Structure formats: structure tokens, C-alpha cells
Amino acid sequence: MAIVLVFPFTFSMTPLEGLSTLIGVYVGGYSGGQISGILLGIPGTPSSICTVFDGYPLAKQGRAGEALGIGIFASFIGGILGGIVMVLFIKPVSEIGLKFGPWELFGLVLFSLTLIATLGGRSFWKGMCSGFLGLTMAMVGTDNTGGVVRLTFDIPELIGGFSLLPVLVGIFALPSLLAALGSSNKITIHSAVTNELTIPYKTVFKRLKENWFNLIRSSALGAFVGALPGEGGSVANFLAYDQAKRYSKHTELFGTGCPDGVVASESGNNACAGGSLIPTLSLGIPGSAADAVLLGVLMVHSIPPGPALFKDSAMLVYGLFVIFFVAHFYMLALQLGIGSRMFLRVTQCPPWAMVPVVLVMCAIGCFALNNQMFDIWLFLIFGILGYLMDRAGFPLAPVIIGLILGGMCEDNLRQAFSINSDWTVFFTRPVSAFFIILTAASIVWCGWQYNKNRKMPEKSQKTRHKVVLACILSCFFLSISTILILKSFELPGASRWDLIGSRLIPQIVIISMGICALMSLLLSLIAFKKDPLLVGEVNLSMFGTVPVYIIFVALILWFLAMPVIGFYLSGLIFLWLVCWYLNGFHFTLPVLLTPPATLVCVYLVFTWFLRVQLPEFPFYF
């Protein structure tokens, strides 16, 4: 979004100035996504999802400065290594990447999908159910291969599928913000973080020295994935984190605040920035959506990308190389200087102000994506679902992984069969066979890990509300899969032009989700039978505390009022009421001034400068 918003400002610039401007946003965006992920548990970008797994637990342990410092330096080193790969191997790597057909890309994405199993925690079936939920969501909307509209239930806003941003923000933001709401009106969010407001450089460098091989491996993976046309930081992020976890000597620490995970995630996604410029410049094939905008700058100035670029505009290419490295040094200086002080001050923000202000920013980001209220409601729906899943022990990360990678996996598989109907080609092409063998080995390894963890004693006892919620959500997912499988029979099957059809893969995914939900339900019922103490009265406290209900009701009322009385008036009322409630029903001067000050900043940044059309009061039309 940032690159698209800055793009018009480059029209009056020279080609190098325009590219320099976007490269600055490009590099800053890859690294900046970790800030909200570490401090708030909300990934700023899809490529920073894995950073949350260990960065946010570190922050909650009072090590926010350490986590942020590790992330900043890992981003810098990964970006520099990715830039070196870009400069040294731009021609040979681009030629290799061009030889990657749909068979190889399918194998790579399939291998990345095995990360779903590694992030399932101690419950295999809950983890797989979450993953298949994300894969099912990826099947909704227009089929990219056959052009068939699937599983939308005649909702026009779903024709393009589920937008990633509302799902991502809803799944991660609301559970993170509301998990700390206690049974009283006062909350203690981030209380463990407020003691540390500096970056401990000695500790950070020690962690980086211990992870030197992890740093190099993750950077190499990121640069390699970035060089593949059509992939991106999300795949690099998942793959680097997955490999770091697999080869770590303390796998059980991942997800609990392990610095190794932050190093792998941030170095992998930033190295991808340099790698993705390889096909963009040498072949004219964007490695990601952001790279497509960079191509737009060249096209605006009548400079065609591709092999001729190095011959006709060599100075521009070399200047771009220099700018790429300079941008990383600027990023490092800004984040370690005034940036780190500002970022870490977020941890001192009073909870009564942080929660409603972050919710407002989440709503603005979701609405600005497509300028439609539907995305805001998606944010709320998936926020509620994510909150309940988190309380029931269903991991949240596999949902996003399935949503991001599911479409890629299906598209490449169907393209491969459209070109050649022989399935043995996946095994006769060396690179494709290599990734499939890795996938099989990964599944076996995951099975061994689950069996090993199952024999280990539980660190925490199961609570009644967790098991009850697991039963309820398992029944919900089972019902959803039943409805969707019946709906899927309306889809066309295979034809001579599409040997798989628009029906087969969605049906496989939906049935798999139903099987995993059924197994989760059976295990929850067995838990009731084994432990009679789990059986008891079901009440509303199992679903959340009173403040959580208040926040959800306030969000619903705000979203209902927004199209009627406009964003600013409804937002002011929402902020005042929530701040007043979370402050213990006290209207102090900060409580009175924070909402209007927030909305003035929103107006100056989003409405006046960025020209985002937020819902207005009908009187203004």
C-alpha cells in the first residue's frame, strides 16, 4: 500500500530519483513490519508473520528492546546479503528462475505448506484444522485458472476472494489486544514490557553471533525464493523460519520467545527484497506486487525492463544497486536512532489508550484496502473467530499460511496439468522431485516430532473452558465443511482444457478440514471422559471476560453507525466510550483529549495527505 501511495509522487522525478524513492519505501516496509509484530503481536506485513511467533513472546517477557534489536540487525544483514546476491548473480540466477516451471513452483509451495504441521503446537489435529481452514478460504472467489466463481454464496464482495489484510489483522490483532483483558475493567497489557526501553546491543550481538549460520542460511533462502517469479516475502518468511526450527537444537523453544526465530524470519524476508529484484530487472517479471510498481516507474519513463536494460541503461542499474545498499544503512540508522526510542515508547502507552487507538488504525487499514465496509466486517468476524480459536487452543498462524499459499499451490498444480497431463513429470523433473522428496521427509519429521512431544508431560493442565470451546469450534468447522462440500458439487469438473477442474482441489481441502475437525472433536470428547473434573456448567465466561464482550459490542455498534453518521463522528464516540470504560469509568483530561487528537492525526495523514476516502456523514454529500 505504501509503495502504491508514493508512486504518483515519482512521475515528475528522474528515473533514478523515482526508483530511489520507492526503494526506500520498499526496504523500510520489509523491515518495518516487525515493529508492530514484536511490540503488539500484530504483523505489519504478511512477510513479518513469523516474527510475531517469537518476537511478541520476547516482548511480553520484558525483552522488547532485545527482540527489536535482533530484528533490526537481522533485517539489515539479510538485506545486505540479498543485495550482494542480486549484484553478483542477477544474470545466472534470473536464468535459473526462468527455468522454474509450474512443476517446480508447486513443489516449492507444497514444501512451504508443511510449515502448517510444524506450527500446530501439541495438538496435531487442531493445527491441521486451522491450516485447512486457511486453504479452504483460499479456494473462495474467482478461480484463476478456469475463471469460475467458487463458494461465494452470491456475495459480490467475495468474487475476488478473501482479502488478506482484514483476515490477517483480524486473526492476529484482536486476540493479541484482548487476551490481556481481565475480568475487571482494568487491563494489564504489556505490563511486563514497560521496564525495558533500550536496545541491549551487547546481548543483541551475542545472539547474532550464536546464529551466524542461521542468518546466512535464512538470507540465502530468502534471496533464492525472491528470485523465483511470482513468489515473495511471505514464502521466504515461512520457509526460513521453518528451516531454522527444524535444524535448531532447541526446537521446543520456538514460539515461546526464541531469538533464533526472529533472526530467521527477518533475515529471510529482507533478503527476499534483493532476490525479487533479480527477475524484475533482468526479465521484466515482478517477483511481488511491490516489484510490479517498481516496473511501473521504468515504464512511465519509457525504459523497458529486461535483458536490454543492462545494455541501454547500465548506469541506471548500477545506480539502483548503490541505492539499494544505501537504503539499508538509512533504515538501520533510523530504526536504531530516533526510531527505536519512539517504537519502544509504545510499550509505555496506557492500555486504555492503546487498545482503542490500535483498533481504529486496524479499521482504517482494512477499509482503505478496497474502500468498502465489507472488509471492516471481515476484520471483526475473523477477530472474533481468532479470539475463540486462541482460547480453544487452535493455532492462528496456519490459517494465514494456508490462505497465502493455498492459491499459489492450486494455480501451479493446475497450470502443470494444463501443459502436460502426465503426473510423473513432477518426479522426472529434478528440481520438482527434489522439493517433493523434501516435502515427504518434512512430513515424516513432523510426525516424529509430534510423537516425541506427545510422550512428554504436559506443562499446563487442560481447563474446562478450553475443552468446551474446542468441542464447539470443532462442531462449527465440521458444519462449515459439510455446507461447503454440498455447495462444491455445483462447480464444474474436469474438461479437456482443465484436467483437474474447479471442483476437485476445493473438495479435497474441504473434506480434509472436516476430517481434522472431527478428530479434534473426538479427542475433546475423550478428554471429557478421562477427566470428570472437566465436565461442568457451560457459561458465558468460557468465551471471554466482560471487557472482551464490551469491546466486541462497541465495535459492532461503531461499524453499524459508521455508514450512517460518518467515520469521524462515530469514531469519536467509539474512542471516548472505550477509553472511558477501560480507564475505570473515569473521564480525565487525557481521556477527553486522546480521541480528538487521534482523529485529527488520522484526518491529516489519511484524508488530507493520502486522500483515503473514509465514510462521511451524509450531510457532506
Image (cartoon, rainbow, N blue to C red):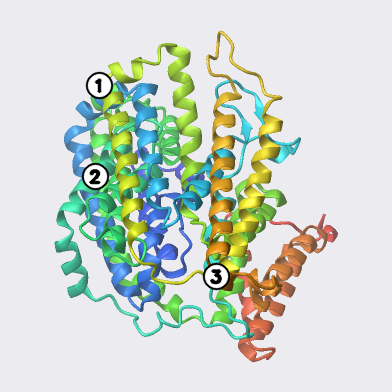
**In this orientation, which residue lies closer to the viewer: 268 or 138?**
138
Q: Residue at x 62, y 82 (%)?
A: 183
Left or right: residue 190 versus residue 483 is: left
Q: CA distance from mark 2 to mark 3?
A: 34 Å
Q: Position of residue 595 (x, y in %)?
A: 65, 77
Q: Residues within 10 Å of mark 3 (few under 14, many from 20)?
A: many
Instruction: Report if residue 9 is visible in the image.
Output: no
Looking at the rendered image, the disc whose residue lies closer to the viewer, 3 or 1, is: 1
Q: Is residue 159 above or below residue 326?
A: above
Q: Are marks 3 and 1 in contact (CB under 8 Å)?
A: no
Q: Secondary structure at mark 2?
A: helix
Q: Amino acid at mark 1?
A: Pro
Question: Given the image, on which type of amino acid does mark 2 rest?
Answer: Gly
The answer to which quarter of the image holds residue 93 is top left
Sort mark 2 into few (<14), some (14-19) or many (20+) by Cα contacts within 10 Å: many
Separation of disc 1 and disc 2 at Cα?
25 Å
Task: Where is residue 165? Give x, y as percent.
Answer: 55, 50
In which image quadrant can residue 492 be found? top right
**Residue identifier under label 3:** 177
Could you tell me which quadrant the C terminus lies in?
bottom right
Residue under numbered circle 1:
430
Residue identifier under label 2: 82
The residue furthest top is: 496
Which residue is at the far right?
A: 619
Q: Residue at x 45, y 34 (%)?
A: 296
Q: Position of residue 109 (x, y in %)?
A: 39, 35
Q: Is residue 417 above or below residue 556?
A: above
Which residue is at the front of the view, 56 or 198? Answer: 56
Q: Quadrant of residue 221?
A: top left
Looking at the image, is mark 1 or mark 2 earlier in the sequence? 2
Q: Amino acid at mark 3?
A: Leu
